[in-house]
Image: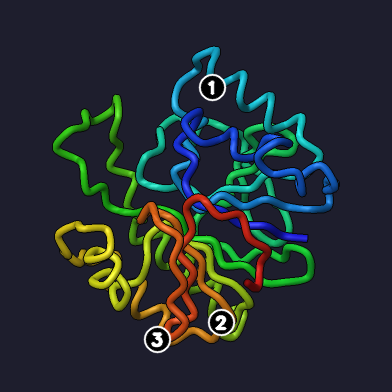
Amino acid sequence: MVYLTGDIHGPLSVAKFSSRAWPEGKELTRDDYVIILGDFGLVWDDSMECRYWLKWLESKPWTTLFIDGNHENHAMLATYPEREWHGGMVHEIRPHVLHLMRGYVFDIDGKAFLAMGGAYSHDIEYRTEGVSWWPEEVPSDEERLRCEDSLSEHGWSVDYVLTHDAMASATTSLACMGRRIAKMDEYEEWLDTIAANLEYKRWYCGHWHMDVNRERLGLRVLYHDIIRAGE
């Protein structure tokens, strides 16, 4: 079984996986997966708080997977060991807490998942480079090419797409709902070109801090909700 949810921002929202908040999790096994759609935030520093919550997640009965968002310590994330996992490359944060690296298609529970983390920060003016913001938040040309090559190898057809940000064709309405100034960026426009050429069943993203279903685009934006893949 595969479950998905939105940003947890480290200790701020990780407790939504507690047995009290999400009793369904008690019935899962290591062969079940919970995917966080960016802004994981527990690879932020080497504080006792981050280490505590990573140990807590590792103790859960399922396997935790995450894509990266813009609010991550990308420099620290890159120091973790890489290994091949289910058809793509991951950073192993803990044995059962894995970062799905950008641009790979993973075979998870018999379904093809494209993982493509990253986004531009809309609050960059309040952050400090190398302390609370890293330029690697936006996927590089190399990572975008890897994504396109992975999709070519899969005939431009996957079951599910996992991104942190949404494609440009969705961002104007999402920005209005979030009362944010609608400023499309070039990465969102690139995601639009991917969506236009890709056959997929559902596209899932976080980033926007809301739970919204955009049926026309096959897009599900997640924040608080924890849902099963396919919903």
Q: Which mark is residue 145?
A: none
Whole-angstrom CA distance, mark 2 to mark 1, is 35 Å
Q: Amino acid at mark 3?
A: Ala
Extreme residue in the front direction: 20
Which residue is found at the position 63% from the left and 33% from the top?
93
Q: Amino acid at mark 1?
A: Cys
The answer to which of marks 1 and 3 sits earlier in the sequence is 1
Q: Amino acid at mark 2?
A: Tyr
The quarter of the image holding the C terminus is: bottom right
Determine contact: label 1, label 3, CB under 8 Å: no
Q: Compare residues 159 and 202 and report the one nearer the observer.
A: 202
Query: In the structure shown, which secondary structural element does the residue marked by tag 3 occupy?
Result: helix
Q: Which residue is mark 2?
A: 200
Whole-angstrom CA distance, mark 1 to mark 3, is 39 Å
Q: Compare residues 68 and 39 and report the one nearer the observer.
A: 39
Query: In the structure shown, which secondary structural element does the residue marked by tag 1 occupy?
Result: helix
Asked if 104 appears above or below 207 in the picture, the reply is below
Q: Which residue is mark 1?
A: 50
Q: Compare residues 73 and 6 and report the one nearer the observer.
A: 6
Q: Which residue is mark 3?
A: 196
103 lies left or right of 107: left
The quarter of the image holding the N terminus is: bottom right
